[in-house]
Amino acid sequence: MTFTYILDGHIAHQDRMGNAGNLGPGSAQWMKAASGIIHSEMPKQENGLLRGFQLWINLPAAHKMDHPEYQEYAASVFPVVDTSDYTLKVLIGSFADTNAPVQDDITKVSFFDVQVQPGRSFQLHTPAACNGFFYMFEGSGQLNGHSVASQTLVIADIEDNPIEFTAAAQGARFLAVYGKPIHEPIVQQGPFVMNTREEIDQATRDYESNQLVRDRARMHRNN
């Protein structure tokens, strides 16, 4: 399963079963590949800019063969929590009683785009027993007393609640992501992520024999 979030530029995408679309600045796509999608993505610059993120999310074994589907969202659909200290775009999950259009009861993932004003602070309270990370892509600051520079990924100690970030003099912008651990073995090869070597080998045979895609993915657009 993937979540693609575009900041600048565009990504045109299509799959072998006829689904197609275009993601522009601020928009996002939640794609549950599950039992199989053969999918292509064509990034395109706009005014010389192309920037975004793609998070790969592992499904539990019990859901790896679910029916595939897309959820595609325009930038205007995502709610924003705006305070004097920070602005937070709720992309997946919930924050401060504000709910994103993307909710997933299987993985319990939350995904926020947070911009903190210069010298101001932001606190994040997370559920117990979660795994998470922060990715600083603009500015810098202090995360629970430790310096974090731009272009830095920090694996968060979720047990140390609340997590507190204070921006440096130029402010900061980062992704805050966390979810429920699956506690299952993972075997990965190319685009395939399964639980055993045998399942990976079967997925490869299915792809090579044109049997990977069993059902056309359902497409849901929210504009």
Image: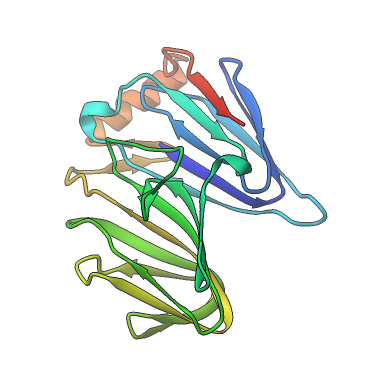
Task: Give the image location of residue 95, x and y in percent.
Answer: 38, 54
| The C terminus - image quarter | top right
Residue 145 horizontal side relative to residue 86, left or right: left
Q: What residue do we see at 22% from left, 35% from top?
A: 196
Residue at the extreme right: 47
Q: What residue do we see at 31% from left, 24% from top?
A: 202
Task: Give the image location of residue 21, x and y in percent.
Answer: 65, 28
Task: Using the image as rendered, state which of residue 29 and residue 33 is in the foreground.
Answer: 29
150 shown above or below 107 = below
9 shown above or below 64 = below
| The N terminus - image quarter | top left
Q: What residue do we see at 36% from left, 22% from top?
A: 35
Q: What residue do we see at 46% from left, 65% from top?
A: 135
Residue 41 horizontal side relative to residue 163, left or right: right
The answer to whether residue 89 is visible is yes
Task: Give the image location of residue 30, x and y in percent.
Answer: 47, 36
